[in-house]
Image: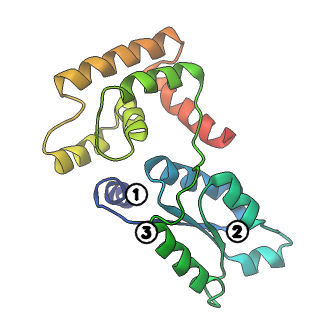
C-alpha cells in the first residue's frame, strides 16, 4: 500500500534511529512477518507485543524474553489501552537508538540459489542502508523502491551500468538454480514464514 511504501522509505532512507514494530499478541505468528521484514532493513528494531490483556483473556501466553533472544531485538509486552509496558517500551527504544542493544539480529535465510544471487548482488556494493535487503529488492525488480532510491540517491541504482550488470549475472544465477523472476517473490514469502 502507499502507507507501507512511505514507512519503508522512511525506515530505509529517513535516518530513523529506531523502529518500533507493533504486533498483536493474540495473533503473533502472523504479525511476526512484518517484524522480520523490518529487521531485514534495520538492526535498530524493537518489537512491541501489544494487546497482552486480550491475549491473556484468550489464554495466549507470550514469552517475551525467549522471543527477544530468538529475534535478537528487544521485545516488550504491552497493553497500550491501560498503559501497561509503555514505559518499558520507551526505555527499549532509547537503548536501541543509543546503540546499547546491538546484538545478533535474526536474519531470514533463503533457498541456496537465492542466497548465492544475493551474495553476488550484495558484492555490487550498492551502498545505502541494508545492502542485503536492497539487493533482494533490486533482484525482485521492485519499481516502487527504485523510485524511493531515485529520490534518496538522485539516480536509479538498478540502471547504474555496474549494478545492472551484476544484477543480470545474479538473475542468471537464480535461473540456473530454478528460481524464475516470478518465483522469487514466492520464495521470499516462504522463507519469511519458515523463519
Q: Residue at x 66, y 42 (%)?
A: 195
The image shows residue 66, relative to residue 84, as above or below, that is: above
Please say if 36 is above or below 22.
above
Residue positioned 72% across, 76% down in the render? 52
Determine which residue is flagged by label 3.
Answer: 97
Disc 1, SS: helix
Instruction: Between label 2 and label 3, give the one nearer the viewer.
Output: 3
- The answer to whether mark 1 and mark 2 are in CB contact below 8 A is no
Left or right of 190? Residue 118 is left
Residue found 49% across the figure and 46% down from its top = 40
Report whether 36 appears left or right of 67.
left
Few, some or many C-alpha atoms within 10 Å of disc 1 (few <14, some 14-19, many ≥20)? few
Q: Is residue 59 left or right of residue 32?
A: right
Residue with the most extreme right position: 59
Local crowd at mark 2 within 10 Å, few (<14), some, or many (≥20)?
A: many
Asked whether the residues under the numbered discs 2 and 3 touch, taking CB atoms below 8 Å apart as contact, a structural biologist would say no
At numbered mark 3, what does the secondary structure look like: helix, strand or loop? helix
Residue behind mark 1: 4
Amino acid at each position: 500500500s502507499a502507507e507501507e511504501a512511505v514507512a519503508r522509505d522512511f525506515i530505509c532512507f529517513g535516518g530513523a534511529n529506531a523502529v518500533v514494530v507493533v504486533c498483536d499478541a493474540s495473533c503473533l505468528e502472523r504479525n511476526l512477518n512484518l517484524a522480520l521484514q523490518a529487521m531485514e532493513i534495520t538492526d535498530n528494531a524493537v518489537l512491541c507485543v501489544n494487546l497482552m490483556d486480550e491475549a491473556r483473556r484468550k489464554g495466549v501466553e507470550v514469552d517475551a524474553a525467549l522471543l527477544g533472544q530468538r529475534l535478537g531485538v528487544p521485545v516488550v509486552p504491552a497493553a497500550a489501552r491501560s498503559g501497561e509496558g509503555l514505559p518499558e517500551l520507551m526505555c527499549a527504544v532509547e537503548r536501541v537508538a543509543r546503540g546499547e542493544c546491538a546484538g545478533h539480529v535474526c536474519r531470514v535465510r533463503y533457498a541456496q540459489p537465492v542466497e548465492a544471487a544475493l551474495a553476488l548482488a550484495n558484492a555490487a556494493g550498492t551502498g545505502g542502508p541494508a545492502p542485503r535487503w536492497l539487493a533482494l529488492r533490486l533482484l525482485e525488480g521492485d519499481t516502487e523502491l527504485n523510485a524511493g532510491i531515485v529520490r534518496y540517491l538522485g539516480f536509479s541504482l538498478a540502471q547504474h551500468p555496474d549494478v545492472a550488470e551484476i544484477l543480470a549475472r545474479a538473475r542468471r544465477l537464480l535461473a540456473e538454480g530454478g528460481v524464475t523472476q516470478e518465483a522469487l517473490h514466492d520464495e521470499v514469502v516462504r522463507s519469511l514464514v519458515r523463519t
